[in-house]
Image: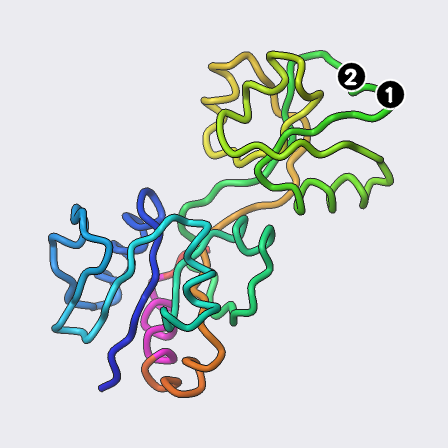
């Protein structure tokens, strides 16, 4: 049986994906769930897990150091890697939305949009025929409207709690997000039987 290298993000997606794999019948080591290691073996299933930042998972899969991976659709939309998207796992549900201070209009000249998703944001406003200036930030996006850096932000919303705590309101939902099982195109050909088995086992557990 071929060993399968799986890239997974740490945090919420990892926890939900781990649970899904166990429900699908895979015998995974319990320490995988709280391991501080970056590479963890699951010898009973011939799995090798690479634990990475969410944005890096598709990079590892695209370059073939991981055969498959689990990545949020937000990452896939923003970076458009050359990978096969095999299955919507229906986990880690959230969405990308625009938000800002309540009851405030956007600047009529050139509205400024702060985001860590510049490609998604640009595409959204272009599709509406609106010209905007995109300001790319990597953290504390909610700060931008509060300090006058931007008219709106484009960011992931899960419960809306963070927006509320910072005095912001949601304006428009852009796209719903779930986590996807992705594969390296070469690995998919060479290890098709193994990967197809993984897809089918997970498909039976998916609730969309």
Q: Residue 138 location in percent, x, y? A: 52, 34
52 to the left or right of 81: left
Q: Residue 105 location in percent, x, y? A: 78, 16
Residue drawn where x is 18% and y is 47% of the image: 36
Residue drawn where x is 49% and y is 25% of the image: 140
Q: Residue 6 location in percent, x, y? A: 32, 66
Q: Residue 90 appears in which quarter of the rendering?
A: bottom left
Whether the magenta-drawn stretch holds residue 34 is answered as no
The kind of secondary structure the magenta stretch mainly shows is helix
For this rendering, which residue is in front, 180 or 153?
153
Q: Which residues are magenta?
A: 195-205
Whether the magenta-drawn stretch holds residue 200 is answered as yes
Q: Considering only vertical position in the picture, is 204 above or below 75?
A: below
Q: Secondary structure at mark 2?
A: loop
Residue drawn where x is 54% and y is 22% of the image: 142
- The residue under label 1 is 108
For this rendering, which residue is in front, 132 or 181?
132
Disc 1, disc 2: CB below 8 Å? yes
128 to the left or right of 72: right
Q: Secondary structure at mark 1?
A: loop
74 to the left or right of 36: right
Spatial CA span between label 1 and label 2: 8 Å
10 Å crowding of disc 2: few (<14), some (14-19), many (20+): few
99 to the left or right of 87: right
Q: Residue 112 location in percent, x, y? A: 74, 26
Residue drawn where x is 43% and y is 54% of the image: 56
Q: Considering only vertical position in the picture, is 43 above or below 141?
A: below
**Quadrant showing the N terminus:** bottom left
- The residue under label 2 is 105
For this rendering, which residue is in front, 200 or 60?
60
């Amino acid at each position: 049986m071929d060993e399968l290298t799986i890239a997974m993000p740490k945090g919420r997606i990892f926890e939900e994906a781990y649970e899904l794999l166990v429900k699908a019948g895979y015998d995974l080591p319990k320490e995988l769930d709280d391991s501080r290691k970056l590479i963890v073996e699951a010898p009973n299933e011939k799995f090798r897990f690479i634990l990475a930042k969410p944005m890096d998972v598709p990079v590892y899969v695209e370059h073939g150091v991981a055969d498959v991976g689990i990545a949020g659709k937000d990452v896939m939309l923003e970076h458009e890697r050359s990978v096969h998207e095999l299955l919507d796992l229906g986990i880690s549900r959230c969405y990308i939305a625009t938000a800002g201070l309540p009851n405030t209009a956007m600047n009529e000249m050139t509205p400024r949009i702060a985001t860590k998703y510049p490609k998604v944001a640009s595409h959204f406003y272009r599709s509406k025929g609106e010209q905007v200036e995109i300001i790319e930030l990597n953290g504390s996006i909610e700060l931008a409207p509060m300090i006058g850096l931007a008219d709106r932000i484009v960011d992931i919303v899960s419960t809306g709690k963070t927006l509320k705590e910072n005095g912001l309101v949601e304006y428009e939902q852009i796209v719903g997000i779930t986590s996807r099982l992705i594969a390296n195109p070469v690995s998919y050909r060479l290890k098709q039987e193994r990967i197809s088995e993984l897809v089918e086992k997970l498909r039976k557990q998916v609730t969309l």
